Structures are given as C-alpha cells and as structure tokens.
Image: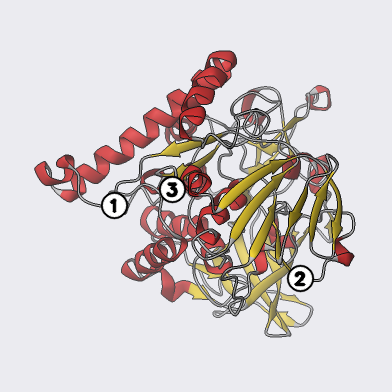
Amino acid sequence: MNGSMNGTMNGTAKGEDNFWDVVIVGAGISGINSAYRIQTQLPDQSYTILEARGGIGGTWDLFKYPGIRSDSDLHTFGFPWRPWQEQRAIADGASIKKYVRETASLYGIDQRIQYHHKVTSIDWSSDEQSWTLTVDVDGKTKYFYAHFLILSTGYYDYAQPLPAVIPGMENFKGTVIHPQFWPDDIDYTDKNIVIIGSGATAVTLLPSLAEKASKVTMIQRSPGYLLSLPNPGGDTWLSHVLPRWLSSRINRIRFLIVPFLFYHFCRAFPNAARRALRRVTTRQLPKTIPHDPHFEPTYNPWEQRLCVCPDGDFYRSLRSGRADIATGTISRVTADGVTLDSGVHVPADLIVTATGLKIQLAGGARVDVDHKPLDLASKILWKGVMLQDVPNLAFVIGYANASWTLGADATALLVCRLMKAMGKRGWSSAVPRLQEDGEMMKRMPVLNLNSTYVLRAMDTMPKAGDRGQWKARDNYFTDLWNAKFGDIETGLEFQKVPT
C-alpha cells in the first residue's frame, strides 16, 4: 500500500518511502512482537518500525546498571511464538537483549527498523484517513504517514526518571547515580554504597553491588514484599525427558498458571497471604535483621507490584554481612552519608537513587486529531488498547500483575483481528466512542496499583471505565479470549471514507 495515497503535509509528499499501512513506534519487546503479528496475520500490509534509539531492545538496551535482570519470568515475558529456551526463569539484561535481537533477525523484523527516528508528534487527518508522524532524525525533521499506528513505546520516560526530593543531597561529597543512567566507568570496589528505594531496581542492585562493595545499605521509606524464586540454570529432569520445544511449552504453561493463582490468592485472602510471606521471609533473614519493620508493608500483597529475587540472592547478601537494610524517612543527606529521622547515620561514598520511573505514554509525542491537541488524561481506553475519540491508534500496555509481554501480545492479536475486519468491510477507520450515557461512566486507573510512580502519574494517564468494553485489563486468559473471539464492534464507530 506504500504510496497509495496522495497529498502533502508541510511540503513533504507521501510517497513510496514514507507511507505505510502500519507504523509501529518502538523496537522493544512490544514492538518486535507487534511486528511479528502484523507480518504473519496481515502479510499484505506494509509496515515499518521507528525506533528513537540506536538499537533493539527498549528497556534492555537502555539500562546498564549492575545486575540488571527481568523481574518477570522469561517463560511468559518471552515471545509466545518463539519461547524462551533456557531453564532459568529470571534472566540478566544482556541475555534478554540477545534473545530479542536474535528473534528479530530470525524473522526478518530487524530489516524493518529505522533507528534514530524519534517521533515527536502524531496528527490524524479525517479527510485523508491517515496519520502524519513528525519525526526527528539526527536533528532533521522528516514526515511519515500511516493508515494505522501502534505505539509500542513502553510506559516510562527514557530521558528523565521520576523526580525525588531528597533533603540535603547538595551537601553530599561523593558520587550520586540514578540507575537509569549508570556510567560505564564507575568503580565502586570497597566503597560504602547507599541505595535509596525499595522497588525492583533496588532489590536487583543490592546483591550485585555487594559482590564488590565494602557495604551496601538499602534505605527504604516503607517496605515492600520480596519473594525468593528458584532459578535453576542447568537442565531439569523435564528437559532431559522431553524435547526442548515441548519442555519450554510446559514451562510457559506452568508460569502462566501458578503466578495467576498466587495473585488471586493474595487479593482474595490478603491476611493469609501476609502470614505466608512473613514465614517465608523470616526464615531467610539473618538474626541481626528483624522482620519488623523492614519487611512489614502497610499494604496487602499485590496492592503494589511484588518483587522477586532469584534464588534468594537479596537475602543471601544480607546474611553475608556485606549488605544491610534501613527503614525510615531521610532527615538529610550529609557530606559523608545519609541520616534518618531516627538519628541513624549510614555512611556512603556512593548514593544510588533508585526512586522509580516517570510514567510516559506515546514516547512523549504530542497527539493531535485534525490539528487539535488531545488531552490523554481526559480520555478512556477501549479494551485497554484504543483511545476514546482517536481513530486507528493502539497503545501497547502490558500488565502490572503479570509479564508485560502477555498484555502486549493480547493487544497485538486484537489489533490484527480488528484490521482484518476493517479490510473485509471496507472500513477506513475505527474510532472508540462513548455512548450518550458515557459521561456517567466512572473513571478508573488503567494500572491497578497504588505504587508511588503510578499514583503520581494519574493526572497524565488515560483512564479505564467501570464497565463493558472500557474496563481495565488485568487477566491474560480473558484478554486472550477477547482478542481472538470477543466483541470488537461495540464501542467503536466505523467510517468508510474514500482516500
């Protein structure tokens, strides 16, 4: 379909080299997955991937901090159409990036990626029934055009982390690093390190830094839940008995079902879940570190994302004496460390501010419809995918309570099915519309978590509804069924406009 539409925008004509049936923004794991689904289910549709950075991998190409790894199992975080073959469920960042890169190469997807193409704005034209993408390419502005747009840009700002006000940080004489921008040349051997934060990044950093540092102390304002996950690296009896492809499939099914049941157990029986997690945690702690207050959250399990540590590496570091944990509010940062409100002073040569990610959708691009800017926060997502009043646009948003890729794939399958239906019926666009009583619909968060970084982004995020096609997604099995067989017409307004 390249070049099948005529017209100009800001003097840049649509042509063979800049018009596509589908443009995918982002070459991370979601973008590669979307590309595979497009080229296998819609082989007659042209597509390209626009990637702002210079490599494949998204998160796994950006983060370089010590010990970077997944916090979801790779059996479900990996592609369902090319299963993760290793037995270890939790993998390091380099292995994940290699897996994504090899997969893209194997299926020819890497040939469709245009690197250093940062999308700065997108504008839908109702007259032409297409999107115009304004793209920064090494400082020069170029324009691309697409019939359908898939935003696989992830959910956070690559350029700026979540800002955190830490009193007295200007007094510190040592080095301050945010994990999102870890320098290659930092030497922390025999240093005293303080990690500020208690999320997945902090939990990952502590055991890795403790291997070389003199002492690593994680300072948390409030504790979270941390579950050890066995992570065997070698072959298991299953892989010896069965072909690798079959054992990988079985592992994927196991990791789909067990975490699903555990999550719903935690939400249905929070007190029992708290007691069970307490027993498991207490057994792994050294006698010098009590369970309370360091591992006694104020919220129930899975009201915030539950962190995991492979083979209990976090607790092993605590038992070694090379790592410690402190719970409380920071009073001030001094020249040589961090002082808590309790008066406890933690010495530091290096402070790592693992204070969270800044949520951002669409890669920060401005979204316009017929040259009118759109306020994302005022809109509701149809099936957690398409934005109210915006034609032919899909947001790829994964799950907060399961592997991101599960939600990304359910989205890709739904989009492909919708595009097939549109093609068969000659529809040129599909627009999510609320019915007349839609304004009465209760607005709900898209991500059902009360984590700080989620709560602070509520005013900028689109919302979910409380019923029907507008409800938030949180169940892969239901979403997969809906993507393949569910209603894809209710809540959408279809248009058939000659182009």
Does dot 2 land on a helix, a strand or a loop? loop
Disc 3 marks a residue whose amino acid type is Phe
Disc 2 marks a residue whose amino acid type is Gly
Residue at image coords 39%, 34%: 256
Q: Most extreme residue toward the front, as rendered?
A: 288
Residue at image coords 48%, 31%: 482
User: Residues at badges 2 and 3 in contact (C-beta under 8 Å)?
Assistant: no
Badge 1 is on which residue?
233
Looking at the rendering, in which quadrant would you find the C terminus? bottom right
The image's colouring method is secondary structure
Does dot 3 land on a helix, a strand or a loop? helix
Measure how far apart labels 1 and 2 are at the Cα level: 37 Å
Disc 1 marks a residue whose amino acid type is Gly
Q: Marks 3 and 1: which is nearer the front? A: 1
Pick the residue in front: 124 or 110. 110
| Number of the label disc, if any, that sits on residue 77 | 3
Is 110 located above or below residue 41 in the figure? below
Mark 2 closeness class: few <14, some 14–19, many ≥20 residues within 10 Å: few
Does dot 1 land on a helix, a strand or a loop? loop
| Number of the label disc, if any, that sits on residue 318 | none
> Between disc 3 and disc 1, whose residue precedes?
3
Badge 2 is on which residue?
174
Question: Is residue 387 visible from the viewing direction of this image?
Answer: no
Measure how far apart labels 3 and 1 are at the Cα level: 17 Å
Pick the residue in front: 348 or 403. 348
User: Residues at badges 1 and 2 in contact (C-beta under 8 Å)?
Assistant: no
Q: Viewed as shown, does residue 327 lie left or right of 62?
A: right
